[in-house]
Amino acid sequence: MKQSHDVIVVGAGPAGATLAYELGKRGIGVLVLEKEKLPRYKCCAGGVTRKAAKLLDFDISEVVEDVIYELSFNFKLGRPYLGQHSQPLIYTVMRDVFDHFLVKRAQQLGAVLIDGQKVTQIQVSADWIEISTTDNIFRSRLVVGADGAYSVVARELGMVRSMEYATGIESEIVVPEEEMAKWKSRVQIDLGCIPGGYAWVFPKRNHLSVGAGCLASKARHLNRHHQKFLNSLGISSYTIARSSSRLIPMCTKGRFVWQDKALLLGDAAGFTDPLTGEGIYNAIQSAQLAAPVIENSLVRGKVGLQDYQQIVEWKIMSELRIARTLSKNFVRFPRLAFGVFNQSEEVWRAVSNLMLGEINYAAIKGKVGGFRGILNRLLRF
Ligand SMILES: Cc1cc2nc3c(=O)[nH]c(=O)nc-3n(C[C@H](O)[C@H](O)[C@H](O)COP(=O)(O)OP(=O)(O)OC[C@H]3O[C@@H](n4cnc5c(N)ncnc54)[C@H](O)[C@@H]3O)c2cc1C
């Protein structure tokens, strides 16, 4: 017999788990279908900015690996610009632990998880949506695609449009204690050593997450550049516990993220910041924006989910558009991007306030007089 549910969420990453939690708070029953067995590894630097953590109404400290107060920006591993802050800017996490922690929160509010269930097909009829997995068929009134970069929901419902991709590669390097101590509370970002992107080091409790990312169109030699970056840090001889790569989806202009009975969240919608590669913030934010729209539809009988499109246009896509314009220039001119930091403390203040969630791209753009203002400053530099 087919099981019937109000809402089926496909994917138990930060987007799916947060939506299940938010709907649980509203007394709405949710089934979460996840293809992996939880906890599952996720290729990610595991940087949860302070602004992302602030979105959650519970404490995440039990799953935090390190707390970052300092960012070191380099150009081709040269002399760094060191930005420091008295408040935590980023929390580093292991995604298997962090994501499972979020799912458990949702389960406490009544969400049902079935893991090891890969969704393969979705069929929409007038009354129901039928969701097939490798060994089951489920029915629901609404379906939400929170199934990441390779979203089957977006594909099955014909919503894979207006998308660009970056490629990210990540290695978990186990280093001795004295090496770990050098990285405590500090993230390093290197501009210029990865054509069309950047490289990073994020410290965890017992190892370093070292990665690199760039536009997928420039990723042919990403592996080689990543290896060179590891060599130049002097840590390539240590054990690589894990190494993998994934696509990072970024929506472009005109992306539709809703249909009559379906919504897309997080990576499935392409909500990663094209400048920084940060995706957890918008995964959580999109889920929080979707929850009241779903409630209006299921509980108050409001027809259609188009309000979700409107709210994400305003809160998310407008921000991503600015980040995209900045990213295009910074990717093309990494030396200039690095030089901007040395120009004045004001730039670091803006960057740190972005991470703290005290300012957004629109406010920065307004403050410096639009893109023309930003360009003038760069030219002055
Ligand atoms: C190398 C790299 C480094 C990154 N570093 C950072 C960082 O430091 N900070 C940051 O904020 N962001 C980072 N990101 C981006 C971030 O990982 C994503 O934006 C974020 O995971 C999006 O969350 P999500 O819930 O939308 O999707 P995901 O976390 O991808 O979750 C999707 C879930 O859906 C499941 N799923 C997929 N297909 C199916 C299916 N057919 N049936 C059932 N389940 C399915 C998957 O198994 C997965 O559990 C990085 C990305 C990469 C590639």
Image (spheres, rainbow, N blue to C red):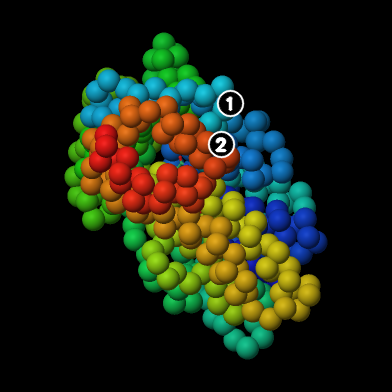
Q: Nearer the viewer, residue 361 or 247?
A: 361
Instruction: For mark 1, give the secondary structure.
Output: loop
- Proximity of marks 1 and 2: CB atoms separated by less than 8 Å: yes
Q: Residue at x 76, y 49 (%)?
A: 108
Residue 54 x, y percent position in the rendering: 64, 40
Q: Nearer the viewer, residue 355 or 203?
A: 355
Q: Residues within 10 Å of mark 2 (few under 14, many from 20)?
A: many
Say if 222 sits above or below 16 in the image: above
Q: Which mark is residue 87?
A: 1
Say if 168 sits above or below 121 in the image: above
The quadrant of the rendering that contains the N terminus is bottom right
Q: Residue at x 27, y 34 (%)?
A: 381
Q: Which mark is residue 55?
A: none
Residue 69 x, y percent position in the rendering: 51, 24
Given the image, on which type of amino acid does mark 1 rest?
Gln
Circle 2 sits on which residue?
Answer: 356
Q: Nearer the viewer, residue 273 or 230?
A: 273
